[in-house]
Amino acid sequence: MFGPSRCRVPVRSSTCYNLGVPAGAQPEMHELLAIDTDAGTRLDRFVAAHCAELSRARVQDLIDCGMVLVNGKAAKASQKLRGGELIIVRAHPRAAPHAEAESIPLDVLYEDDDVIAVNKAAGMTVHAGAGNVSGTLVNALLGRGQALSKGGDPLRPGIVHRLDKETSGVILVAKNDAAHAKLGEAFRKRAIQKTYIALAQGVLAEKSGRVELAIGRDPIHRTRMATQRKSWHGASIANPREARTDWKALAKIDNTTLVEVQLHTGRTHQIRVHLSALKHPVVGDTLYGAASELRVNKVTLPKLGRNFLHAAKLGFAQPRTGAWIEVRAALPRELREYLKKLCDAAGESQSRIDAALAGYL
């Protein structure tokens, strides 16, 4: 008789690129015995409960591949146990993940021997992660034969900072490890200047302002970040980190405000969280409270299909020479067209908005 054993196989995320398992690699074998009190338990839940180091997704993969046998036969994840079954789990080892080259066009704004600055389109993920295994900026860079730094995560070669998937604009990438180290230090010391253009919902009362609120994981909605608030009845945001955002109003268009944002820290979703905390979420950002559609003078504007947030300018010291370099990315066509529709609905002069955005169009 076999007693319940705990799996001891190190697990990597299932949503990544994987090399083939090396020849001769042997799977870890685990034998589990279902007892009377396990009757009615689903097979996948039973295995996950007794193999603490295997995620539910990994268990599902093993079952789908026929690597989990119940009394010597392959079974479905939903099979209910009766008690007394012998379950064999064959957990094949996984090779180290790596990013693969893909032929994807890129808008290169600046390039030298150490760095490359790209105008990332909205909708493109920077690197592989949960639910994104291809079509990333990293895939595109590798697809152009680009040499990238290799000192970090093999799924994130060259990546020293990120932009949200639905945020467009300038992103800086390191070509070698020395440049990666210098740029990483510059970001940590806040020596990189990052300027964004955003359209905020509602009219900001002041001409400029600063938001200094720590940001952490929302304790209720785990896909969101948040600042601390009283309505959680004692719950706290996870791992709060200091964050500072400075903003300046460029123009008011009916019930929206076009703002220039200076980012002094680089927290996940920082601008989106801070503007939402001011009760002025980024237009299009329904995750943080923006309306799905704007209504202006009885006109309902079409959905934007992305967040109105664009990384317009990035300044940095060239990691080898120290020379100051400033890279700009013009406001994307879909955002300019949205502003035109907004101005038309509000009866506003497009030229006034263009003047407010001088240097960003």
Image (cartoon, grey):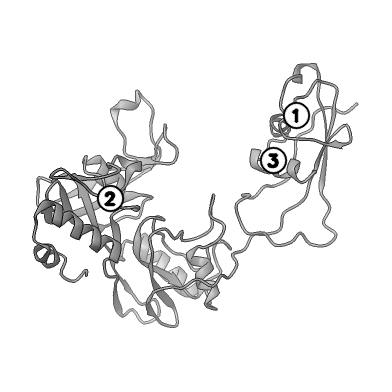
Between disc 3 and disc 2, the foreground one is: 2
Secondary structure beneath disc 2?
Answer: loop
Q: Which residue is mark 1?
A: 79
The residue drawn where x is 63% and y is 49% is 14
Image quarter of residue 205? top left
Q: Nearer the viewer, residue 104 or 218?
A: 104
**Sooner in the amino-acid sequence: mark 1 or mark 3:** 3
Q: Quadrant of the C terminus?
A: bottom left
Q: Nearer the viewer, residue 83 or 266?
A: 83
Relative vertical location of residue 189 with respect to residue 180 in this rendering, above or below: above
Specify whether residue 243 is in view. Answer: no
Residue 229, given in percent of the width and then of the height, sits at 29, 32
Residue type (three-letter) at the residue carrying disc 2: Pro
Q: CA distance from mark 3 to mark 2?
A: 40 Å
Q: In the image, which disc is placed on residue 331?
A: none
Can you say whether 360 is above or below 305 in the image?
A: below
Q: Who's the residue at 85% across and 22% down the image?
A: 84
> Residue 236, percent across and down?
38, 31
Is 257 on the left or on the right of 291, as rendered? left
Q: CA distance from mark 1 to mark 3?
A: 12 Å
Left or right of residue 167: residue 251 = left
Q: Residue at x 14, y 56 (%)?
A: 344
| Residue type, numbered disc 1 | Gln
The answer to whether one can see residue 293 in this image is yes
Residue type, label 3: Gln
Disc 1 from disc 2: Cα separation: 47 Å
Q: Residue at x 27, y 41 (%)?
A: 291
Q: Secondary structure at mark 1?
A: loop
Q: Which mark is residue 60?
A: 3
Percent across and percent down for residue 34 are 81, 24
Q: Dot 2 corresponds to which residue?
A: 302
Q: Earlier in the sequence, mark 1 or mark 2?
A: 1
